[in-house]
Amino acid sequence: MLAPLVATPRRGSAQDVGPDQPETRFNQGAFRFAAQARAALHQLWKTSIEAKQERVACLGGHIENSVVYITHVQPVESTRADSANISAIASLEMCGPPAWFGTVHTHIATFQGQPYTIFSAPDRMVMTLWRQRWKESGVFCLLYSEADANCEFGYALTSRASYGYSRGNNLLF
């Protein structure tokens, strides 16, 4: 006889990020994603792919010893979006301090089958407008696959980061 499956809570240290947590796929490098943020980012990507339109969200968390900890994400409704662009007006209004420290958006368009992994000129303009408005360095990420992001803090810290597991291994975001 098989034993019934019992849901057990996940260990907090395996899901959370921070300097006092063990190193994991999501708790290493310059940009680290807490479990709650990973789930929200995965949903943002999924929604973007299904709609065939870019999506944007506010990013929140904290910065400690030159490491950005992204702990919460809030999608932003936008009235204008297509597969290559999304209006930044709502995110510039909603994603400011103290609750938020920047924005994330999807890059679902591809070129010759490859994703756009870098910030475009219009992306850079929005980042500049955000910094001017909020007088902060800002954290900005773009999701270019179901698991990968390119993130930037201020003008000096930029890095590729994993926010999810790729297809076939997505039990835990």
Image: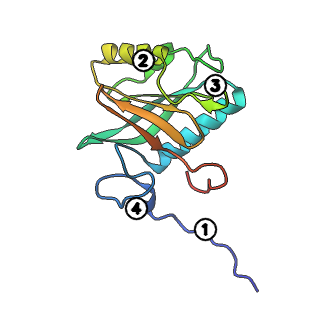
The CA span between labels 1 and 4 is 18 Å
Q: CA distance from mark 4 to mark 3?
A: 39 Å
Precedes in sequence: disc 2 or disc 3: 3
Question: Residue 81, located in which quarter of the rendered image?
Answer: top right
Indicate the amino acid at tag 2: Arg
> Which element type, helix, strand or loop, lies under badge 1?
loop
Mark whose residue sits in front, 1 or 2: 2
Residue annotated with mark 1: 7
| Residue kind at label 3, given as amino acid type | Phe
Image-based side of 172 in relation to 100, left or right: right
Residue appearing at x 55%, y 14% in the figure: 87
**Residue at 49% across / 47% down in the picture?**
36
Image location (x, y in percent) of residue 26: 44, 51
Mark nearest the camera among 1 and 3 is: 3
Task: Classify mark 4: residues with Cα within 10 Å, few (<14), some (14-19) or many (20+).
Answer: few
Which residue is outermost to the front? 112
Tag 1 near tag 2, CB within 8 Å: no
Q: Amino acid at mark 1?
A: Ala
Query: Where's residue 160, x and y in %?
Result: 44, 39
Mark 1 and mark 2 lie on one chain; the one further toward the N terminus is: 1
Mark 4 / mark 3, whichever is N-terminal: 4
Tag on residue 111? 3
Q: Which residue shows up at 59% across the image and 38% down it?
A: 145
Numbered circle sitting on residue 124: 2
Callout 4 amino acid? Ser
| Above or below: residue 101 compared with residue 66 | above
Picture quadrant where residue 33 is located = top left
Rendered location of residue 162, percent (x, y):
48, 45
Q: Position of residue 121 (x, y in %)?
A: 46, 15
Real-space CA distance between mark 2 and mark 3, rounded to the nearest whole angstrom:
20 Å
Q: Which residue is mark 4?
A: 13
